[in-house]
Amino acid sequence: CFCNERIYTYIQSRFYRAPEIILGIPYTSAIDMWSFGCILTELFTGVPLFPGESEQEQLTLIMEVIGLPEERILSTALRKREFFNEETNEPYLTSDSQNNLRIPGSKCLEEVLMCQSDSFLDFISKCLDWDPEKRISPFDALMHEWIIEGLPEQVLIHHKKMLGIYESEMEDASPSMVEGMDYTQRQLGTNPTNEHSDIIMHHLVESTDLSQIHGENQAQ
C-alpha cells in the first residue's frame, strides 16, 4: 500500500504490525518505522519482540512493554470495543504461558533487549511510540546517534548531503558518492515528504549495522 493508494485490507505481518493497524486508526507511513523497530530488536535478540498469536495477544504484548495508549489515541480507534472497555478504557488482557495476566507497563524495553547501548535503546523506543505523529521519521532516524556513530565518514557525508545539512565542499565526496547523492536528490526533490519514505527507508536499512551493538555487549 501507498499513502495515496490503499488497496489491501491485510496490512503488515502480525509480529510487526503497528498498533494503529490493529485498532483501526487511519495510518500513515509511520507504520513502517514501527515495523523497522520490531525487526531490529528481533535481529539483535534472535526472537520476535511481540510474537502474538492473535491481534488481541499482539496488543497485550505491546502494552506489556510500551504501556497503555493515551485516551486521545483510543478516541480515534474504530476497533476500540474489541480490545478495550468503551466506558473505562480498561484493556482486555491475555495471560502468558504460566497463566499469569500480562500487565501493561510491567516490562521495560531495556529489560527485554538486555542491551548496554543507550543510543540503540533510544532509537528503538522512538520507533515504538504509540503516537504515529511522535514516532521517529525516516529522516530523523537517518541522523540519530545510533545510526551515525558507526558509519564510515564518506557514508555519513552522503547522508548529511541527502538531508541538506552538509556544508563542506562537494569535492570531499568521491565521484561515485556524488552520483548516488545526485540521484537521491532528483528522486526526493527539494522538499521531501512522506511519499518518499520508501527511498529514505532504503538508505536507513543500508545504514543499519547491529554488529556494533553485539560488539559492545561482548566487550562488557
Image (cartoon, helix red, strand yellow):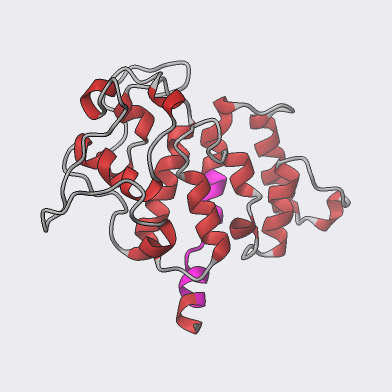
* Foreground pick, 166 / 23: 23
State which quarter of the image contains the N terminus.
Answer: top left
Q: Is residue 43 left or right of residue 141?
A: left
**Residue shown at the point (54%, 33%) measured from the top left:** 197
Determine which quarter of the picture holds residue 106.
bottom left
Residue 121 location (% of width, % of height): 50, 59
- Residue 207 position, x and y percent, is 56, 55
- What residue is drawn where x is 71% and y is 51%? 158
Indicate left or right for 39 with 188 as reference. Answer: left
**Residue 120 higher or lower than 39, as above or below:** below
Identity of the residue furthest to the front in this view: 88
- Give above or below for 76 relative to 187: above
Left/right placement of residue 134 relative to residue 184 reads left
Magenta stretch: includes residue 207:
yes
157 vs 170, nearest the viewer: 157
Q: How many circles with numbers are drawn on the protein? A: 0
Residue 164 at least partly seen: yes
Residue at left 69%, top 31%?
Answer: 186
Q: Is residue 35 magenta?
A: no
Dominant secondary-structure state across the stretch colored magenta: helix
Visible residue check, residue 208: no
- Camera-nearest residue between 14 and 160: 14
Q: Does residue 18 appear to the left or right of 164 in the view shown?
A: left
Q: Residue at the spot x=65%, y=63% of the render?
A: 149
Indicate the position of residue 36 as horizontal and vertical percent values.
43, 46
Residue 71 x %, y %: 42, 27
Tell me where the magenta segment starts and ends, as one range: 202-216
**Residue that extends furthest to the bottom in the rendered view of this protein:** 219
